Image: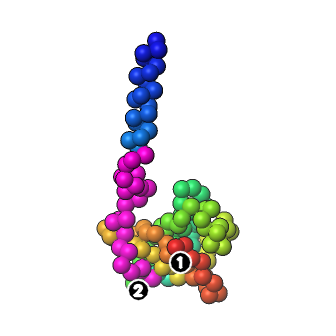
Amino acid sequence: MKKHLKIALNIAFALTVGVLMMPSGLVAHHGANLYDTSKPQILKGTITKFEWGNPHNQIFFDVRDDKGAVAHWVAATEPPLVMVERGWTRKSLNAGDEVTVYIFAAKNGATVGNLQKIVLADGKELTAR
């Protein structure tokens, strides 16, 4: 019995050391290559929903093009605790708010991205990065 416990402890120790030694890129939450971070897109739109929660807040907004077609966008922010440090609250955005969104959009053309900042109609800026 002691021999089996010793083997199990050695395996657990080896696994723990192995995980701790992995490069951080292998355990990263997101790949940085999903979004075009060379320049943010600037979009004028209307908030449809704001979800405050882990692991990221989600901002849903609609953007109307010159022909009147609507694109539904989703922007992710940092986690809520980080956003609180930047002056955000769960009531920072409301459905119907007119906004200008600065976003690093997906490279594949999907209407999603990482939020850089958002400017409210009154000129107030809320930064995410």
| Front residue of 102 and 49 | 102
State the residue lying farthest toward the left: 108
Q: Secondary structure at mark 2?
A: loop
Give me the C-alpha separation between circle 2 and circle 1: 23 Å
Dot 2 corresponds to which residue? 66
Q: Give the numbered dot on residue 65.
A: none
Q: How many marks?
A: 2
Q: Report if residue 6 is visible in the image.
A: yes
Residue 31, quarter of picture: bottom left
Dot 1 corresponds to which residue? 117
| Front residue of 29 and 42 | 29
Residue 70, quarter of picture: bottom left
Q: Report if residue 93 is visible in the image.
A: no
Q: Are marks 2 and 1 in contact (CB under 8 Å)?
A: no
Residue 40 magenta: yes
Crowding at label 1, few (<14), some or many (≥20) Cα neighbours within 10 Å?
A: some
